[in-house]
Amino acid sequence: MMKNGEKWLDVDGKPIEAHGGCRLNYGGKIYWYGEDRTGDNYVSCYEKTAKGWKFLNNVLTVNSPKQPTRVKSDLSLITEVASGEKVHAIIERPKVLYCEKTGKFVMWMHYENGVDRKCARCAVATCDTPYGDFVYHGSFNPYGNDSRDCTLFKDGEKVYFFSSSRSNLDMHVYLLADDYLNVNKFIGALFSNELREAPAIIKKNGKYLIVTSYCTGWKPNQSTFSVSDSIDGVFSVNQNLGDENTYFSQSAFLYENEQGDIVYFGDRWGGNDFNKTGVFDYAKSGYCAYKIEFDGKTATLIRSEDAFNE
Ligand code: GAL
């Protein structure tokens, strides 16, 4: 049983590096992708086995192959600064879906150049397998908008990209093109001036539940939830989820387990140490899995020491 907030170990006893990530069910297997900031890595992929999470590959790294698409984008993953030093880009909150039309696994993520936080772009990569070496297709600002914390959500045939925009003031919703390589329509903006980020969405019994956090960097804060009958419909007024620090976590994604429970998967950035000492070390970041009870109107986060369903 994994403990909430700790940096969990994989089946080989190595720390799992999959922060701000996502979960993909494909071909009867369950994959977990997330940020890996060790060495030259950007995104790693793990597979769920009977014994625990098994590391498969560093699917996106500084050295990933690059290929432009029809989308005008910036292919760089390294920035050379005035001193001549080469700085790694920052890749955050990678989300992966399978595109039936193209047969590709498509990753969307948040890109910053590693020098400052002004780019605020989304970025796209693809691969023929869930855990192969992804090809990087570059970063861009969707319709010119800034785009930070993000998620993907597949609703039947349609796929939506959610990202915090207007300096995190609003949460933007875009419909993706049918090859998932670009945004195709601006659906609208949610939660105007509410400063919500870390979006995570699930559909259950016809209701769409979106969980977001407030913006306090790595420090945990009060998450909220909102409910709608459709993605382009009206979302309810945000209501608090969990306590003022969301049981020391920030949302990464939501999923439904085999029993039909909704699981909230979050990051405890900086691990338990950050919350005790105030000294932040990204490398110590841990994971949290809490159950969410959702009746179609109200969502309740269930606090636990043990990670739920892990
Ligand atoms: C958080 C965000 C994280 C990361 C961090 C950097 O608010 O959710 O993904 O960007 O800020 O300070």
Image (spheres, rainbow, N blue to C red):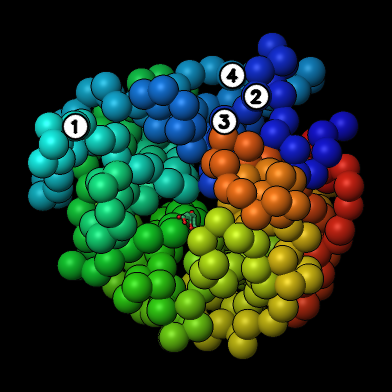
Chain-order first, disc 3 or disc 1 = 3
| Kind of residue indicated by mark 4 | Phe
Quadrant (top left, top right, bottom left, bottom right) of the C terminus: top right
* Residue closer to the observer: 50 or 53: 53
Secondary element at tag 1: loop
Which residue was labeled with disc 4? 55
* Residue closer to the observer: 101 or 222: 222
Which residue was labeled with disc 2? 15
Q: CA distance from mark 2 to mark 4?
A: 10 Å
How busy is the neighbourhood of tag 4: few (under 14 within 10 Å), some, or many (20 plus)? many
Q: Residue at x 36, y 51 (%)?
A: 110
Q: CA distance from mark 1 to mark 4?
A: 31 Å
Secondary element at tag 2: loop
Residue 205 visible, this angle: no
Pick out the residue farthest to the top: 12
How busy is the neighbourhood of tag 3: few (under 14 within 10 Å), some, or many (20 plus)? many
Q: Residue at x 41, y 78 (%)?
A: 170
Chain-order first, disc 1 or disc 4 = 4
Q: CA distance from mark 4 to mark 3?
A: 9 Å
Q: Is residue 42 left or right of residue 223?
A: left
Quadrant (top left, top right, bottom left, bottom right) of the N terminus: top right
Is label 4 within 8 A of ligand 1 (CB to nearest ligand atom)? no
- Residue 211: image x %, image y %? 62, 67
Using the image, tell me which numbered label, if any, was put on residue 85: 1
Contact, CB < 8 Å: mark 3 with mark 2? yes
Q: Tell which tag, 1 or 4, sits nearer the viewer.
A: 1
Which residue was labeled with disc 3? 17
How busy is the neighbourhood of tag 2: few (under 14 within 10 Å), some, or many (20 plus)? some
| Kind of residue indicated by mark 3 | Glu
